[in-house]
Image (cartoon, rainbow, N blue to C red):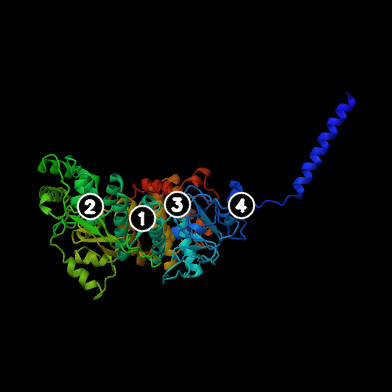
Amino acid sequence: MIFLVIGVIVAVAVGAFLRQQSRISEPPKEESPETVEIPEAEVSEYDGNEIFIPAAKPVTSPELASGATYSAHAPAGEESPYGRSSEPKKQAQAAANLLRWCGRSGNIQLENITVSNPVTYWSNGEAATHEPSCIDVTLPVSFPKQEEPLPAEGAESYASMTPLQRGIYLTWLAGARIQPPLHMCYPAIWLYGIERRTIVDKLDLPMCISESFRLLPLLRWDVLKEKLITFITWLAIKVWLPDEDLLGFCKRLSVVPEGLLDIMLNSYANSMLPLPSAVAFTLVRTSEKLHRPDDPRIPHSDEDLKTFTPIYKDLCKGGLVLIKPAETLKIPYTPSNPSIKLSKKDSEPVEVPDFFADLSVFKTLVDSWEVFLTAKKKDEPVPDLADISERPDFEGFIETLRPEGSDLPLIATLGDVGKLMRFDTSPGTKLTGKERKSVVDTAQVEGWQIIPDLGVSGREYNWADRILFLELAPGTLLPHSYRVASFMLEFICASIAADEDRVFEPLRQRMNDFFPLSEEDNIRLEAQKPLDLPTQYGPDFYGEFMCSWLSEPERKAVRNLVLDAVSFMPGFGGNPEVNSILCEYLGLRESEEISPQDMKKSPKDKGAEVMKLMALLFKNS
């Protein structure tokens, strides 16, 4: 028995030895990089020495699909239409020149900045496919220093940008593209990538529409805005955008392209159901063909919709019922991206039913709009100008002070307006609250907004104060968010003694992170620069009346927002002198640090908190 056991042990040992020898003699198998799984910790690591692309999901254009190579640094994922390659030998070859897509679920890290969800193309070296929007991570990048002016010129592509321009562009992308861009070239180059993604790759069309929607309110260049609206219209027809998304987009515009309205109406034609009030209101409010020349352009308002609805349902007998017309409207689109060459099929115009071929269909709807405008005009508050014995020649006043041929905002003094309105402006006299209200009301009647806000409680106004006039459509109500943003921008500029454009512009853009501001609000903020560079008063002036009206916790909230606003600016971020000045004039203890709860608050939360407490300062305006 013992000899049997010994024999078994020897047999097992000999078999193991032979198998080991067999493995040693075999050549090692080459492993495809696609089979390597990278732990999340490794993907996110960046040592600062080499450029590294963590978790960016690459998608190449169709013409490069056959040679696509997915490296471990850029693993294929659910956004890739090509999946994993079935040819491991091709995958072993590096492809630094592959044009790759980084969408909402990816991020790019280069230099010392992480760009999350950039929604654009990137490459590790010059891409084989020329694409102006492609971020070549091997190109140098620099970021503006305090003494360095921001570039005023633009660029035609990411590759042709200077290192400083790339730094500004990447910073804008890293900020989730929620701030107005500094130059038209930055959103234009980003849009090149959106065009390639939708037209060439034919992917992510709804997502690209959504991202285009977000960008539209930030554009102040009419040429680019019109191009973007045309692109959205063309793309919306391609995918037949859902009704709620389409309506939500149209609500943001004062004028909506005819093709976009045709898409919106197509969903209700031949249904025998009345056009919903919100759709009818948006249609007649934004259509160029249904608008009469003298009708005012008004923004969307839920309050106005409530007023319009019963008028519309009464005159249209429950609502307008549409029948799909036989005529169609052809909408062409030419890409602005110079690297895209459309095929004959892709260059063909898209077609939609032309609901505006016969305008008589909308007669009752247009009548409803006219009745609504009449009712709205009657409900508008009439400014109290009883204290003015004669209506002043405001138009002549503006023409006299404005330099001939100038279209710049007009700057004057309160004393100039006071003399026009026959107020006592002699030395030593100050404006009363009633006089300030009369100045504002008179200016608004004549179509002008006065900056700074003359209705801030506790603030002392003098006849020598400089004021700025901006054109303002009659009946326009300035939102509370804008008025607070304007005041805070003025206060911040005073706190850091801002005196240069390169300081003012980033601060002006930063206000969008704290407050919900429209495109018009941003234009107004941009216009107040001549008053804020430099401001007329120091931080002590603002601190005095804020200490009178706000409690200590409320003044801390103001301090925290200011520190957050300047935190990213070279020379001011983390500068203890800024905190020292704020604490001194806001009556706070400098040694008291910001609480952990306040540190966790987002800019939007800080802005909402300041807007709420500032209601006290603006209660009389």
Identify the residue under disc 1: 212
- Residue drawn at the location 10% of the way across and 43% of the way down: 315
First reached walking from the N terminus: tag 4 or tag 1: 4
Q: Secondary structure at mark 3?
A: helix
Identify the residue under disc 4: 32
Amino acid carrying mark 1 in the image? Ser
Q: CA distance from mark 4 to mark 1?
A: 38 Å
Identify the residue under disc 3: 561
User: Residue 373: x percent and y percent?
Assistant: 14, 51
Crowding near the residue tagged with mark 2, few <14, some 14–19, many ≥20 C-alpha atoms within 10 Å: many
Dots 2 and 3: beta carbons under 8 Å?
no
Q: Secondary structure at mark 1?
A: helix
User: Residue 104: x percent and y percent?
Assistant: 45, 50
In the orientation shown, which residue stands out farthest toward the bottom? 404
User: Residue 177: x percent and y percent?
Assistant: 42, 56
* Image side of residue 220 versus residue 39, left or right: left
Query: Could one spot residue 506 in this view of the protein?
Result: yes
Residue 12 higher or lower than 380, as above or below? above
User: Mark 2 or 3, which is nearer the eye?
Assistant: 2
**Of the pair 605 and 393, the residue shown nearer to us:** 605
First reached walking from the N terminus: tag 1 or tag 3: 1
Q: CA distance from mark 1 to mark 2?
A: 18 Å
Q: Secondary structure at mark 2?
A: helix
User: Mark 4 or 2, which is nearer the eye?
Assistant: 4
Identify the residue under disc 2: 261
Crowding near the residue tagged with mark 1, few <14, some 14–19, many ≥20 C-alpha atoms within 10 Å: some
Crowding near the residue tagged with mark 4, few <14, some 14–19, many ≥20 C-alpha atoms within 10 Å: some
Q: CA distance from mark 4 to mark 3?
A: 51 Å
First reached walking from the N terminus: tag 4 or tag 3: 4
